[in-house]
Image: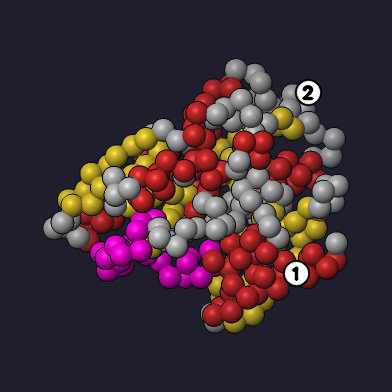
Amino acid sequence: MKIRIGSRESKLAVIQSEIFMEEMRKNNPGVEMELITMKTTGDKILDRTLDKVGGKGLFLKELEQALLEGKVDLTVHSLKDMAMDIREEIPILAVSKREDPRDVLVLPQGAKEIDFSKPFGCASLRRKLQIQALYPGAAVKPVRGNVLTRLAKLDAGEYCALILAYAGMKRLHLESRIHSVFEVEEILPSACQGVLAVQGRKDFDRSVLSSFHDEETFITSMAERSFVRALDGGCSSPVAAYAQIQGNQISIAGFFADDDGNCSKDKITGPKEDGVALGQELANIMKRRG
């Protein structure tokens, strides 16, 4: 059996695909795999923030088309980058065990503290609003490009610091660049941050993915996505969610900001099998509150 894996060309995307492929080879020795990389629309547009050009779904457009046309059999994504509405023909078939979901603070090479005369660099309104709550008066400027490109801009003096995902830094073996880690109570992460998703055509034999798939992560991820979807939140919307399972209970923390930038956080807990409904309920509670 041969499986063709589609991936973006970026170093992190390739590493994430290789994580999946390594797990597959370990547990399915009879399966041959081929990695096929491609540049997506989101990789090509670097002069505007994603909310101005159609959202993070632009990173998946060409990969989804490759699946539909049968050019690849599976694609591997950061689940946080996937649109809330996924086409029925190409569903999520499996998700990984979650890597650390938190955000981190990265300073320029050699810096020991934040230089507030320069702006923070971050690509999402979610991060911007929460950073400004932690550091009142701090300037924040958009930054685009892959992680290595952003680090180069930071080290060139354009920013005082970057806010990045811990998971990506770990997968790129760049932990030494991390100055500090934000707890989820400080900066609530993007829904499904740290989770890898495998997407494929609905008739694909999912049994070969069983060793990769983590059911607990799937439950928390669907709960988080339910919260974001109920708020009509896309990837660049000021919405965040983080769910955790303890025993038979699931707790979901949500962050939401209105059009005026007023932010609110709340939390809900209930049976883990009701995760999707609880995510919707939390969103409705926060919407009613305004």
Asked whether, in this view, residue 94 is left or right of residue 21, the answer is right
Inspect the image, locate mark 2, and give the three-letter code of the amino acid beneath it. Answer: Ser
Which numbered tag is attached to residue 117? Answer: 2
Q: Position of residue 285 (x, y in %)?
A: 78, 70
Q: Amino acid at mark 1?
A: Asn
Identify the magenta region.
Answer: 198-221
Going from N to C along the chain, the mark reached first, 1 or 2, is: 2
Specify the label residue 284 is tagged with: 1
**111 displayed left or right of 285:** left
- Regarding residue 240, the answer to whether it shows in the image is yes
Identify the residue at horizontal 26%, vertical 56% (top origin).
24
Residue lying farthest to the left in this orientation: 30
Measuring 57% from the left and 27% from the top, which residue is drawn there?
A: 46
Residue 220 on the magenta segment: yes
| Mark 2, secondary structure of its residue | loop
Q: Residue sitting at 77 percent across and 28 percent down?
A: 116
Q: Say if the magenta span includes residue 252.
A: no
The local secondary structure at tag 1 comes to helix
The quarter of the image holding the N terminus is bottom left
Compared with 68, 223 (above or below) is below
- The residue sitting at 74% across, 32% down in the picture is 140
Does 185 sit left or right of 4 as displayed? right
Which residue is nearer to you in this view: 99 or 112? 99
Residue 92 pos. (x, y %): 42, 61
Residue 13 in view: no
Furthest-top residue in this view: 156
How many other residues sit within 10 Å of disc 2, few (<14), some (14-19) or many (≥20)?
A: few
Mark linked to residue 139? none
**The C terminus lies in which quarter of the figure?**
bottom right
Question: Is 169 or 259 nearer to us in this picture?
Answer: 259
